[in-house]
Image (cartoon, rainbow, N blue to C red):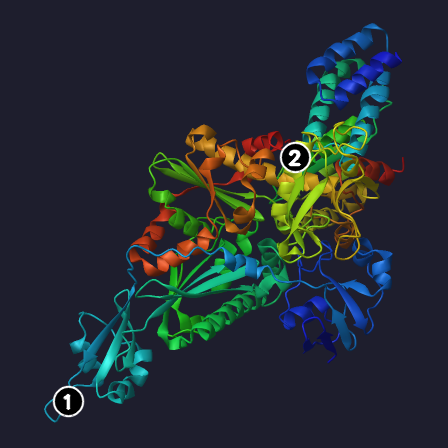
């Protein structure tokens, strides 16, 4: 089992999306539990991917290729996972705030969350405040993640937080913020619960806020 | 009010207690690198407090300064509040302005065709039989019909006419009477061309008869205290009360300093300067005219105007003939300014028959692709890496900046430093060269990742292998050891620096690709590439090709054209025909907004690797 799990991890790390489904099938055929493939394989390797990304050892293209490989593998694995929901870590609503159309960084955060077993609801880019509020209300996520890559749109993060406060939902969700110009000081200033400098730290921060 | 003395600049200012050192420096008109505009996030505005209470270090200061620096009194100027008299030393910096003027092209136009015309006229003296008022007397003798005498001209007309016994020189701008001067001044008429750079403002004074450039000068843009890039400045302008006025005052002061210098150098009187042509990015054009730039900064990046915009010098308080004309050349879009129109004019792109590409690389990379009867432009957020910001040892191209790096696999690193002084950091063109050399020597791989002494190619010399080091901030490669550098620090390129450069070069490359797609051509069909701007003039073209900043186009088709934006302004000053051509460009040029295109993000990711 260790052998095939390692093959899966290598395939994800080197972004071999074309081989991952065959490897997952091989593992299932060898009676490796789907939840083990997820935990020992995908979640473990995405942790590694995140760590290497934090250290700038690997970069956006490799992270995206790894994430795509993981996605492809997960698509095959999902039907086998329905039974056990034990890996469910939480639910995240995420989006780039209004005025901000940057997609790549936010997508990497999505993938890291998925890799860590979160259910991710991606609202996309240039998301109006109301849409965040609506989704917090209806989806009841534990985490709301806001992205801004552009100085003039940073203040839109505060607008979202204020809108949640006005809607009486502020204490229903933990809010984390990120993006190139965002800093811990800024996050504190606008009343966010957490800040993370990159996609993998975002997951760590979210887990920390959820107390696990 | 407490006084702040900047000993490095021998300047002293009073500031209200509680204001920041950055404010004090701005008041003293000392340019400080302040990339983030005082938010405490960039860490570039370091200063050393020699005397006075520096206060408790803030979180931002603890993040950007080492404990030793804090111990020695270093602060971030934007976070240090002046509560009592202070003496402050700023890190020694020679301005990069000198480098900017060095490459101004002096092109003699074929035909000088100024829009300022002078006519020497001898008026009939009033007599008992000729009681016409002065104004009518003047208008009746002018060579053109339908002219108007403005209140300003009228105000002094009676004395002007009589000063040289009714011999006068009439000055017309685009067929409008703008001044009447006593006697014969027809030998002298001058104009100015100015490029409002975000960092440096360059200007020339030109003889409008011969087209000769009499003098050229450059000065740091005094707006820098409000942020190094236009987005920070727009943010400031929008958020502060009277922010727009402050920024306008700063740019007008900068231009006036420049004009004063040009006049002093040439001994030309300000009243002999009748015209000023201005180019700049769209935000600078807004600031120059005091126009609200708020909606330039957020999608869909709508400018208040594209122009051209013309007004009297007096309306802006500029130090030239107050009745002289100021013309801001037209912009194309929020992030494609009149500077790019200047580039198109100077390179003749709008009239060429073949396919040509022009790139102006700065914080924003502006790209123009012309051919097949169409002109496409886009602006791409290259980030500040090319200007040395967000690079660990990044700096502007000034004294002590590494501007070139050579790596000989079986020998060592060789550096070329501006002014030959001990290295203090690396500028954008040096960074590109360094990374191209890293790739060639196998110091980094094609994904941009550093090798190390073990994984590097076997034939790498031991002296080079020693240069791979690990620090708290990750893998690095040492360009200059502490014993050779100006401040004793190892000057290194970090892994993160390489990632920043990858982001920047991919943005430019992806922008070029999108324009090619839109025109339906491949890169091999591009006949000529113009690299403009300071960075484009100093960049090593081979390195730009090796790193993939530029598409694979034969190097002989790529030329640096210097400050072509400014050349365009000069052309517009001395040639009415050229000037008129620019007026049509906003209507002809097709602007592509990249930030809303999904395919741009795909191209961008694809272009990140080397």
Secondary structure at badge 2 equals helix
Using the image as rendered, state which of residue B170 and residue B110 is in the foreground: B110
The residue labelled by disc 2 is A104
Q: Residue at x 39, y 35 (%)?
A: B355
Residue B131 shows which numbered tag? Answer: 1
Residue extending furthest toward the bottom: B128
Quadrant of image for the C terminus of chain A: top right
Q: What kind of element bears circle 1?
A: loop
Q: Chain of mark 2?
A: A
Residue B439 percent coordinates (x, y) = 66, 33
Residue at image x 77%, y 15%? A77
Q: Are marks 2 and 1 in contact (CB under 8 Å)?
A: no
Query: Which quadrant of the figure has residue B18?
Result: bottom right
Please give left or right for residue B257 compared with residue A120 in the image: left
Closest to the observer: A67 or B516? B516
Point out residue A210 in the picture as x, y percentages from the top left corner: 86, 38
How far, Cα to Cα, is label 2 from label 1?
A: 79 Å
Chain name for mark 1: B
């Amino acid at each position: 089992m260790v052998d095939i799990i390692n093959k899966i991890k290598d395939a994800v790390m080197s972004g071999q999306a074309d081989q991952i489904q065959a490897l997952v099938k091989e593992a299932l055929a060898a009676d490796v539990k789907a939840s083990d493939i997820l935990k020992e394989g995908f979640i473990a390797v995405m942790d590694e991917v995140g760590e290497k990304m934090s250290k700038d050892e690997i970069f956006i293209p490799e992270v995206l290729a790894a994430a795509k490989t993981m996605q492809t593998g997960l698509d095959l694995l999902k039907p086998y996972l329905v039974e056990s929901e034990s890996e469910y870590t939480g639910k995240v609503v995420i989006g780039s705030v209004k005025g901000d159309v940057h997609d790549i960084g936010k997508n990497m955060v999505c993938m890291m969350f998925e890799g860590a077993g979160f259910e991710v609801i991606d609202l996309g880019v240039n998301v109006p405040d109301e849409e965040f509020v609506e989704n917090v209300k209806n989806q009841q996520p534990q985490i709301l993640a806001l992205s801004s890559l552009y100085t003039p749109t940073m203040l839109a993060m505060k607008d979202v937080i204020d809108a949640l406060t006005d809607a009486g939902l502020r204490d229903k969700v933990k809010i984390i913020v990120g993006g190139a110009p965002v800093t811990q000081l800024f996050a504190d200033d606008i009343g966010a619960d957490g800040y993370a400098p990159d996609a993998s730290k975002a997951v760590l921060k979210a887990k920390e806020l959820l107390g696990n | 009010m407490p006084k702040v003395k900047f000993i490095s600049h021998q300047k002293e200012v009073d500031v209200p207690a509680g204001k920041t050192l950055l404010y004090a420096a701005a008041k003293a008109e000392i340019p400080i690198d302040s990339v983030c505009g005082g938010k405490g996030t960039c860490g570039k505005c370091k200063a050393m407090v020699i005397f006075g209470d520096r206060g408790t270090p803030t979180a931002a200061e603890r993040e950007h300064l080492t404990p030793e620096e804090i111990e020695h009194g270093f602060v971030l100027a934007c976070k240090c509040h002046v509560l009592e008299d202070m003496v402050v030393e700023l890190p020694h910096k020679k301005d990069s302005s000198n480098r900017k003027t060095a490459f101004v092209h002096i092109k003699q136009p074929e035909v000088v065709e100024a829009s300022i015309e002078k006519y020497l006229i001898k008026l009939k003296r009033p007599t008992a039989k000729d009681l016409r008022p002065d104004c009518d007397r003047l208008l009746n003798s002018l060579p053109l019909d339908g002219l108007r005498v403005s209140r300003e001209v009228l105000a002094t007309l009676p004395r002007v006419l009589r000063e040289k016994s009714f011999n006068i020189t009439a000055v017309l701008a685009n067929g409008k009477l703008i001044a009447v001067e006593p006697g014969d001044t027809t030998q002298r008429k001058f104009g100015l061309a100015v490029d409002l750079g975000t960092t440096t403002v360059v200007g020339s004074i030109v003889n409008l008869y011969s087209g000769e450039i009499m003098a050229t000068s450059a000065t740091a843009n005094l707006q820098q205290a409000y942020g190094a890039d236009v987005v920070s400045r727009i943010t400031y302008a929008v958020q502060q009360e009277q922010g727009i006025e402050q920024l306008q005052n700063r740019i007008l002061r900068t231009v006036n300093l420049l004009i004063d210098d040009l006049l002093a150098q040439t001994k030309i009187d300000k009243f002999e300067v009748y015209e000023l042509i201005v180019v700049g990015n769209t935000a600078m054009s807004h600031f120059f005219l005091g126009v609200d730039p708020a909606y330039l900064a957020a999608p869909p990046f709508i400018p208040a105007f594209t122009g051209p915009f013309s007004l009297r010098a007096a309306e802006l308080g500029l130090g030239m003939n107050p009745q002289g004309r100021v013309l801001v050349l037209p912009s194309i879009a929020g992030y494609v300014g009149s500077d790019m129109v200047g580039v198109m004019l100077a390179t003749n792109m709008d009239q060429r028959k073949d396919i040509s590409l022009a790139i102006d690389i700065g914080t924003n990379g502006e790209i123009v692709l012309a051919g097949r009867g169409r002109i496409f432009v886009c602006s791409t957020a290259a980030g500040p890496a090319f200007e040395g910001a967000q690079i660990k040892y990044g700096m502007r191209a000034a004294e002590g900046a590494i501007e070139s790096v050579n790596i000989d696999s079986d020998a060592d690193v060789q550096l070329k430093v501006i002014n030959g002084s001990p290295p203090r950091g690396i500028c954008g063109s040096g960074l590109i060269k360094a990374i191209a050399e890293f790739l060639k020597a196998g110091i980094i791989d094609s994904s941009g990742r550093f090798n190390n002494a073990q994984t590097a190619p076997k034939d790498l010399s031991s002296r080079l292998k020693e240069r791979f080091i690990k620090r708290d901030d990750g893998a690095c490669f040492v360009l200059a050891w502490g014993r050779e550098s100006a401040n004793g620090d190892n000057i290194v390129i970090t892994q993160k620096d390489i990632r920043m450069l990858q982001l920047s070069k991919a943005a430019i490359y992806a922008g070029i690709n999108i324009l090619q797609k839109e025109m339906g051509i491949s890169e091999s069909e591009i006949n000529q590439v113009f690299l403009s701007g300071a960075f484009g003039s100093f960049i090593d073209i081979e390195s730009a090709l090796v790193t993939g900043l530029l598409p694979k186009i034969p190097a002989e088709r790529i030329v640096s054209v210097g400050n072509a934006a400014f050349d365009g302004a000069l052309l517009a000053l001395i040639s009415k025909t050229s000037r008129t051509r620019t007026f049509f460009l906003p209507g002809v040029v097709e602007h592509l907004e990249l930030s809303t295109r999904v395919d741009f993000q795909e191209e961008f990711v694809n272009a990140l690797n080397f």
